[in-house]
Image (spheres, helix red, strand yellow):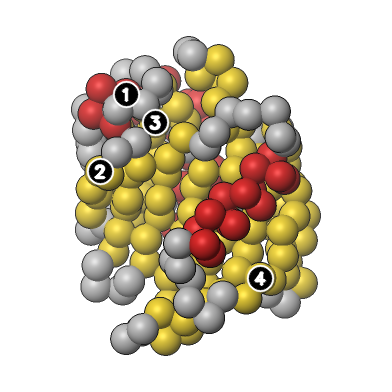
Amino acid sequence: MIGAIAIVCAGLLIGVIVSRVMGAASRSPAASGAGGNGTSAAGPGSTPLPTGYRWYSESAATGGAATGFSMAIPDGWQAHQQGTATYLQDPAAGESILVTPAPAGDAGLLRETRLLAHTALSLGSYPGYHRIAVRPFLLHGALAVGWRFGYRQPGTGAMAGLDVVSPFATSAGLQPYQLLITAPSARWPAAYAAFLEALHTFSPHP
């Protein structure tokens, strides 16, 4: 369930995402003692995840970053690592969530998000790109920025994307993370629901 996060959209535009995360830590395996890479079970005493979801945990040692993380992903999704980036994917549906630490600079989240967008576009990552919106919102009580866009992927067609950059308190201090969902436009409602659950449950840990 994602009652703790309400996202107001006007058509395809990002509106204001107002987050009222109640007890998110209690749903995290980091808080309840569950661990390991790609674990599928929540720890003792944690609130069960929605049907069709499992916990995924990445340790700092495995991910090569200062901190690891845990979050909920749909059953059947697969993970692979590329540097400090973790890709969680449903190969059959073409849906993918990227999780990676974002640069912790002084430019501000909005500027940082625009820089990430500029880098991705300069690399040709999104052919036929069109920007829908870049908006600030509240996530877990902190200011985050969402970048909503569309593009066309050869062999697939119309694609939708939503890139979120948000700071999280970690054992190493405040660390921004980038969470990005891309999916075929026809699959966007299901992919968007999975992304909301990931945002709601995302929790950094050692």
Task: Identify whether 24 is placed above or below 2.
Answer: above
Q: What is the three-letter code of the residue carrying label 1?
A: Ala
Per the image, the residue denoted by label 3 is 69
Identify the mark at residue 131; answer none if there is no mark: 4
Number of marks: 4
Point out the tag, 2 or 4, that comes first from the N-terminus: 2
**Marks 3 and 1, how far apart in space?**
8 Å
Label 4 packing within 10 angstroms: few (<14), some (14-19), many (20+): few
Give the quadrant of residue 67: top left
In terms of secondary structure, where does tag 1 sit? Answer: helix
Q: Is residue 15 left or right of residue 61?
A: right
Q: What is the three-letter code of the residue carrying label 3?
A: Phe
**Closer-to-camera residue (62/196):** 62
Measuring from the top left, give residue 121's x and y in whole percent: 53, 64
**Marks 3 and 4, how far apart in space?**
29 Å
Per the image, the residue denoted by label 2 is 81
Label 2 packing within 10 angstroms: few (<14), some (14-19), many (20+): some
